[in-house]
Amino acid sequence: IQSSAGSVQITTIYHQWNSSTLEIYDLFGKLMYTKEIPKKTEKIELDVSSWNNGMYVVRQVFMNEVVANAKFIVEN
């Protein structure tokens, strides 16, 4: 994960699978973003300029199992 003012770039792993799901939660457990990741998608750029400052948790889910996770901080 790379973050800069107003955006976050996520490099996915397991991009060889048919699809997986990207989920982003705030620290209160509220789902802020979800997106299906098609096969061969390696990078996702997300505009977070309207999000509240704070820490967020990213999860990559495949077949109802979390296969990767990371955290990032939004500072707008």
Image (cartoon, rainbow, N blue to C red):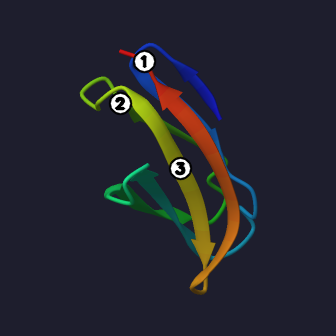
Q: Amino acid at mark 3?
A: Val
Quick check: marks 3 and 1 in contact, CB under 8 Å?
Answer: no
Q: Report the number of discs.
A: 3
Q: Amino acid at mark 1?
A: Glu
Depicted 12 relative to depicted 45: above or below: below
Rendered residue at 60%/86% (across/down)? 63
Q: Earlier in the sequence, mark 2 or mark 1?
A: 2
> Where residue 2 appears, x then y in whole percent?
63, 27
Q: Looking at the rendered structure, which numbered label has been put on residue 48?
A: 2
> Where residue 67 appears, x then y in whole percent?
71, 70
Q: Nearer the viewer, residue 1 or 20?
A: 1
Q: Circle 1: is it few (<14), some (14-19), or many (20+) Cα within 10 Å?
A: some
- Say left or right for 47 vs 64: left
How far is mark 3 from mark 1, CA to CA?
15 Å
- Say left or right for 45 vs 65: left
How far is mark 3 from mark 2, CA to CA?
13 Å
Depicted 10 relative to depicted 50: above or below: below
Q: Earlier in the sequence, mark 3 or mark 2?
A: 2
Q: Can you identify the residue that label 1 sits on? A: 75
Residue 16, quarter of the rendered image: bottom right
**Mark 3 or mark 2: which is in front?**
3
Residue 40, quarter of the rendered image: bottom right
- Say left or right for 60 vs 8: right
Q: Earlier in the sequence, mark 3 or mark 1?
A: 3
Q: Circle 3: is it few (<14), some (14-19), or many (20+) Cα within 10 Å?
A: some
Q: Can you identify the residue that label 3 sits on? A: 57
Q: Looking at the rendered structure, which numbered label has been put on residue 38?
A: none
> Where residue 51 appears, x then y in whole percent?
29, 32
